[in-house]
Amino acid sequence: MAVPWKVLQSVSTGDGILELRQRGERDFLITVNGLVLMNSSLHRSEVALGEVACGHLKHEAAPRVLVGGLGMAITLRAVLDQLPEKASVLVAELNPVVLQWCRGPLAPLTAGAADDPRVEVEIANVADVIRRSAMQKSSFDAIVLDLYTGPHAKTDKIADPLYGEIAIEMSKGALKPGGVFAVWGENYDQGFDKRLRQAGFSVTCDRPGRGGLRHVVYLARLAARPESRPEGRPKRPSRR
């Protein structure tokens, strides 16, 4: 007989009733209005998202990363595992209760990722944080979006606050040259892929794992700034 789920906490939000449920020691669900948003047993795409977004930053001196959506902090844990000691990670999370859960009953799942000294959590809409960062030129090495609604076929191509053309330009403006914009999606959306490319990103998409439900990880990278020659050094003549 299956062990029943126990509701640990239930709160009212703008999207409906948000609940944390537990079954056994390490089996958790986060639901909204009864729909499963996150399952602690199914997270391979979230881990892959954090790894591909930040794997290239392991040897950087002090990289800066923005993570949109805390969830169970599984993506955050994967991000932190790729980063050096002096990195800084800003997490934008809408619901303060989610932060409480990640610092409480969910903490053993991620070795306390939400309390890592490299992490700052801001209770805010990540779209607002990206917009602010683009305006202030506070550039990130990577922006990682792991939200329960990813890009999809019905996304407003221009005005969507996260995945539309305007939002993509804002994300581009908040990144350093060579920066990475990594996004989780439930299914592949050709329109989002196209908008990223039109904005000047080089894009790859992956469906981590084999068989079963395989979500999508978009990895969009900006070109690095060309290396400048030392002042006064003439350009080497062509030998053609």
Image (tube, grey):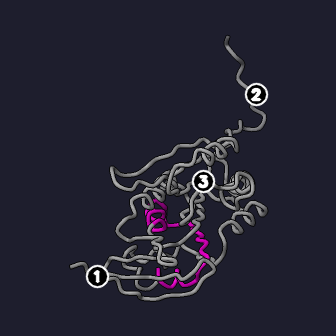
Earlier-in-chain disc, 2 versus 3: 3
Indicate which label's residue lies in the foreground, 2 or 1. Answer: 1
- The span picked out in magenta is 75-102
Q: Which residue is mark 2?
A: 234
Q: Residue 217's spot in the image, x, y percent?
A: 50, 52
- Quadrant of the drawing holding the N terminus: bottom left
Q: Which residue is mark 3?
A: 181
Q: Amino acid at mark 1?
A: Gly
Earlier-in-chain disc, 2 versus 1: 1
What is the total number of numbered labels drawn onto the structure image?
Answer: 3
Q: Residue at x 32, y 81 (%)?
A: 23
Distance, label 2 to label 1, CA atoms, is 69 Å
Q: Are marks 2 and 3 in contact (CB under 8 Å)?
A: no
Q: Which residue is mark 1?
A: 24
Q: Residue 226's spot in the image, x, y percent?
A: 68, 39
Nearer the observer, 208 or 56: 208
Q: Residue at x 45, y 76 (%)?
A: 30
Left or right side of 207 for 65: right
Q: Residue 41's spot in the image, x, y percent?
A: 34, 68
